[in-house]
Image (tube, rainbow, N blue to C red):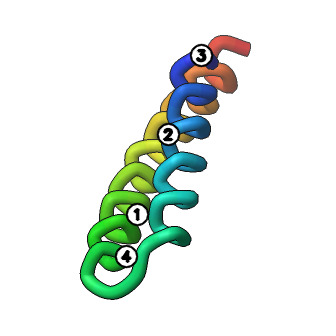
Amino acid sequence: MELLVLQHNRMRELLEEMLSTAGPERRESFEEFVRWLAVHEATEAELMQDTVISR
């Protein structure tokens, strides 16, 4: 669960960065945010699957 919290914090940072930029920098920030979102989604899915299987 600590990993998820760390990912949430990083995604908040990326979102703030994205909202404070414009033009090509904003696009780069957005693309990095999307990559982190995909990683985070996969992490959550794996953790939730492990939780369901262990029950």
The one nearer the camera, 45 or 37, is 37
Is label 1 in a helix, a strand or a loop?
helix
**Earlier residue among tags 3 and 2:** 3
Alpha-carbon distance for marks 2 and 4? Answer: 16 Å
Q: Amino acid at mark 1?
A: Val
Using the image, tell me which numbered label, if any, was put on residue 2: 3
Amino acid type, mark 3? Glu
**Residue that numbered label 1 is attached to:** 34
Residue in the foreground of this view, choosing between 35 and 11: 11
Q: Is residue 30 left or right of residue 3?
A: left
**What amino acid is found at the position of numbered circle 4 in the picture?**
Arg
Q: Which residue lies under the disc numbered 2?
A: 10
Alpha carbon of mark 3 to alpha carbon of mark 1: how far? 21 Å
For badge 2, the amino acid type reads: Arg
Q: Nearer the viewer, mark 1 or mark 4?
A: 4
Q: Position of residue 41 (x, y in %)?
A: 51, 48
Of discs 4 and 3, which sits in the foreground?
A: 4
Q: Earlier in the sequence, mark 1 or mark 2?
A: 2
- How many residues crowd around disc 2 within 10 Å: few (fewer than 14), some, or many (20 or more)? some
Above or below, comparing residue 43 to residue 19 in the picture? above
Tell me the residue at 59%/48% (across/down): 12
SS for callout 4: helix
Q: CA distance from mark 1 to mark 4?
A: 12 Å
Residue under pointer 4: 26
